[in-house]
Structure formats: structure tokens, C-alpha cells
Amino acid sequence: RSLFDTIRQYRESFDIYGTKLSFEWEQVAGEGPVIYSGYEDAKRIEVPDYGYLLPKEIAPYTIRGIYDEEHEHTSFVQGAGHGGSHPHLTHEFIRAILEERESYVDANQAANWTMAGICAHESAMKDGKRIEVPFPE
């Protein structure tokens, strides 16, 4: 996330670097992410939209857009939070309640995702030292 005292577009993103392929989230809104397959080999890709898996009432919110033209927010484009995941996460949470079951993203899963980020930060602050991610019990 880039929110500091810098001049740039708002960005919540991730980049993944490997020895065979690397992925970088879009740097400029609307340009698409990049896959690197060699030092000079790079191509922009289109991330698939899985909104069709959702109920029709919330499916449109997986992509950016203006959803209420009478009350348009001029400060930001609506929808597609975290790459379109918000409607999917919300749908799963509500279905779990209605079906009286545990949600896929339960307390342990959420803690695991959070700990991975904390450990990644700790590793970065220690020059890339390997940090074991504890698994919540």
C-alpha cells in the first residue's frame, strides 16, 4: 500500500519475485500487471474476473466502475477492492452464516495471512533473513 507523503496514485498491491517468473501489480491504474519471464522478457496480462461466480446482485462490484451515477463519488472509482475480492469474501461470509457453517476465512486463516505479512516485514527489516511463519492453533 502506498499512502505515504508521496505523489503517486493510490495503490494496494503485491509483487512476487522468483527465479523463473516474477509478477508485478500494475504501477499505473488501468495498465494491468506484468509477468516477467526473463531479464528482458515482460508482458502485461489481464487478470481474470470471476464475478460470474457470484449472485448477479453483487457480481458487478468485482470490477472498477461508477455504480450510482446520481451520487457519484468523484474522489475514487468504486468497486474492485483488493482486485475484486471484496464481493467474494462478503458472499462467503454471509453464506457461512446462512448455512450455519464455518467460513473459509475463519479466525485461524485470517491470523495466518496476517502473520505471513508480519513475518515478511520482519524478514525485510533483517536483510531478507528467513523467518518462520507460525501456524495458529
Image (tube, rainbow, N blue to C red):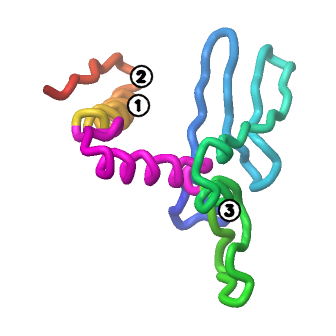
**Circle 2 residues within 10 Å: few <14, some 14–19, many ≥20:** few
Comes first in the chain, label 1 or label 3: 3
- Looking at this view, is 96 or 63 the one in front? 96
Q: Which amino acid lies under the numbered mark 2 shown in the image of this protein? A: Gly
Q: Main secondary structure of the magenta part?
A: helix
- Which of label 1 and label 3 is nearer to you? 3
Mark seen at residue 128? 2
Secondary-structure class at tag 1: helix
Residue assigned mark 1? 124
| Residue 125 visible in rendering | no
In this picture, which residue range is highlighted in magenta?
A: 81-107
On screen, 50 above or below 75? above
- Residues at marks 1 and 2 touching, judged by CB atoms closer than 8 Å: yes
Q: Quadrant of residue 120?
A: top left
Q: Which amino acid lies under the numbered mark 3 shown in the image of this protein? A: Gln
Q: Which amino acid lies under the numbered mark 1 shown in the image of this protein? A: Ala
Q: Residue at x 60, y 62 (%)?
A: 57
Is 18 left, or right, of 105 in this rendering?
A: right
- Looking at this view, is 26 or 95 the one in front? 95
**Residue 115, percent from left and from top:** 29, 34
